[in-house]
Each structure stands twice: as C-alpha cells, then as structure tokens.
Amino acid sequence: MWGNRDVRRSAAPAVLALGLALAGCSGSDAPMAAPPPGSASGATTPPAGTQSPAAPSTSESPSPTTESPSPTTVAVPPKKQTGTLKRGGSRTFSGTGAQLIDVQQAGQFGVVVDLDCSRCNGPVMLTEPGRIDHWADQPGPVRGQYVTSIEKDDTHPRLIVSAQGRWRVTVKDWSTSPVRKGKVAGTGSKVFILDSKAKSLTYDFTPAGAGDMFSVRARGDVGQEMRIFGTDEASKGAKIDKIHLPAMMIIHTRGSWSVTPG
C-alpha cells in the first residue's frame, strides 16, 4: 500500500531538529578588590612633586574563536558495485572501505537501506553523492535502517558506504518492511510499519550521547500524510495526537527508544 503512493520529500531526511534558544545576560556582582596591605581603603594621593608610577599594561590578546565544522559532501569512491532492485525484492552488497553502490530500480517505489557495520571500528558513513545531511555518520559499530527514496521519480539510488572494516548493505522495496503491533522498542535507526487503529501514540527516548536526537517521520496510508515529530532531550511518555495509523515509521537516532500506540 505504501509502494504505490507518492509524498513530498523533505529537504532533509530524517531529520527533525528541535532547537533550544538560549539567551543570557551578564552582570558584575563580584566584590571590589581589597586595598594592598598597609594602605587605607579608598583613593590615595601621591606626595607633591612625585609622579605616580605607570600602571602595568593589562591588555590581552583576544581569544581565538572556534567554529563548528560545516557539513560537507564526500568524494565519490572509485570502487563501485552495481545491481537492479525489483518491486517487492531486495539486493545485498558487501565490502570493505569506501565504495559506491549504484542501483537501478525496476519500478517506482520507496527504498530502505539496511546497513550492517556491526564489526566496524572508526568512522562509519552512509550517504549519497552531493548530500550533506548523511544518513549515517558516526563511530562504529553501526547497525541501522534508512529510507533513501520515497518519490516516484527517484529510481536510481546511488549510495556511498565508507567504513573501517567489513560492511553489508541490503537495499529493498520499503513495502516489505516488517509489520509491528503494540509497543515497539529499539536502538538506532529503524523502519517498520506500525499497524494500529489508534489516533495517538506515546514515545520514550534515551539519547546515546551529546548531540543525539530522536527524529520520526510517520507516513500514514490514509491521505498520504507525513507526520514529523521528535526531540533532542531524554523523554518519557511524550504524546503525539491526531496521527494516522497504520503508518510507515521512519526513525532516525543513535539512542534507545520506544513507541506505543494509543
């Protein structure tokens, strides 16, 4: 049912950023410095005919500013694997290091990529040429699922996998995603169909570390609605109302989570 419908593609997948605006004001409540030993408090006047010694220079060089590195695209690796993905099917690729996976779809349908880099060390990346908000960009080991295509006219996925160690990538028609009922819990990015008649859901989230977020896209089959929600803080029992289920649940995070209909 999800394989034959179209939906607008968001500018960045998965991804929802919930920011906290921080504003600060500073003031000085520190006590005044005490006068040096042997002198009276307050201002002093030097004897006539004498000059006050020059005050030592207290100027400091400005502290260098540091900027967070901007997201960047990655170079296309020279090593390449190719294959064709049929409707309702899957293709598996494996390798080491950095490689390009060039896939031709035989039809128009959403695509899920299952990345198994559970034995990898060092940085792991899953992306596509020209992309800056990479699907996976974190230290290994990594195991996750990512939706790389939901538009009808996107029938040529080109994936870049880069890792220190052996990896396996399975590319599949997203309509073959597992169907789950009731409470679903997991760690990391997952894709599944949540089968329920409930009109709301609650979620819990525990971040994997600083900067981790919980980003969810829920694409209901009714009206092709794409509901987007999430958080960048630990949460328990957060409620989302007026959601259309059943829905394709596209969860992007490194942390632990659960979602419960109703």
Image (cartoon, rainbow, N blue to C red):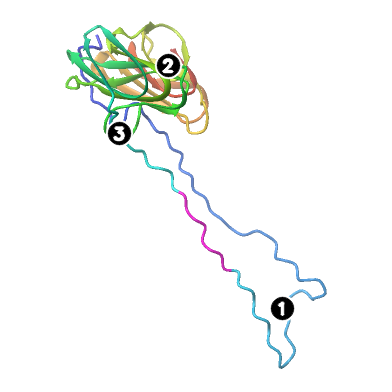
What's under tag 1, amino acid-wise? Ala
Q: Which mark is residue 9?
A: none
- Is 245 a magenta residue? no
Q: Residue at x 47, y 53 (%)?
A: 65
Image-based side of 102 in relation to 234, left or right = left
| Location of mark 2 (residue) | 201
Query: Which image quadrant for residue 126?
Result: top left
Q: Nearer the viewer, residue 151 or 118?
A: 118
Tell me which numbered mark, 3 or 2, is placed earlier along the sequence: 3
What's under tag 3, amino acid-wise? Ala
Is residue 159 shown above or below 11?
above
Q: Which mark is residue 43?
A: 1
Q: Which stretch appears magenta?
A: 59-66
Image-based side of 64 in relation to 131, left or right = right
Of tags 3 and 2, the one toward the viewer is 3
Between the C-alphas of marks 1 and 2, the distance is 69 Å
Q: Position of residue 191 (x, y in %)?
A: 37, 15
Image-based side of 91 in relation to 42, left or right = left
Q: Position of residue 22 (x, y in %)?
A: 48, 45
**Magenta stretch: dominant SS?**
loop
